[in-house]
Image: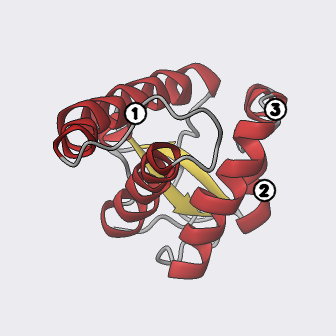
Amino acid sequence: MYHNITAIPIRFAGFWMRFWAYLLDLIVIGSINRIIINPIFRFFDLSLQDPGIFAPVSIVTAVTFYGYFVLMTKFFGQTLGKMVFGLRVVTLAGKPLSWNTVLFREWIGRFISVTLFVSYVIIAFLPKKQGLHDLFVDTSVIHNK
C-alpha cells in the first residue's frame, strides 16, 4: 500500500508522534542488546566495558541500531515504534521504498541526524514534517489509515 501525496489526503506525523515512536524503538534496540548481544559477549569473555567507538561491543551495538532501522523500514515500511503509534515511512512520490532510499535515510541520514540532534527538531516546522534524513531522500512519515 503506497500513498501518492497528490491523490490521497494524508496526515504527516509530527515531531512528538515520531519522538515517542523513536523512543520506543530505542527501548527495543536496548532490549535486543541486553538480551542477546551482552550475554554473547559475556559467554565469550569479551569486555563490555571497553571505552571508545571502535570497541567490539560498540561496533556490534551500532550494527544492531542501524540494522534494526534499515531492515524494519525496508521490509515493513515502519519500525516497531512506528507500528505501535500507527506511523509509516513513505516516499513523497508514492513509490515503494528502494534499498538506496532506505539505506541512505536510515543509515547515513540517521547518523547525521543523531550527530546533529537539532536536525530532528526541524520536523516540527516543515510542512511535510520531514527530518533532515527525510529531506535527503524525499520521504516522510505519515499516519496509517
Is residue 130 in sight in this rendering? yes
Whether residue 22 is situated above or below residue 96 in the rendered picture:
above
* Residue name at image x 33 percent, y 44 percent: 46
Residue beneath disc 2: 135
| Relative height, residue 68 to residue 31 (above, below) | below
Q: Residue at x 71, y 56 (%)?
A: 109
Secondary structure beneath dot 2 equals helix
Q: Quick check: 28 left or right of 142?
A: left
**Residues at marks 1 and 3 touching, judged by CB atoms closer than 8 Å:** no
Numbered circle sitting on residue 122: 3
Q: Secondary structure at mark 1?
A: loop
Mark 1 = which residue?
A: 48
Residue type (three-letter) at the residue carrying disc 2: Leu
* Residue 145 is at least partly visible in this image: no
Q: Which kind of residue does numbered mark 3 sit on? A: Ile
- Residue 123 location in percent, x, y? 73, 33
Return the disc, 2 or 1, that comes first in the chain's sequence: 1
**Disc 2 to disc 3: CB gap under 8 Å:** no
Query: Tag 2: Cα neighbours inside 10 Å, few (<14), some, or many (≥20)?
Result: some
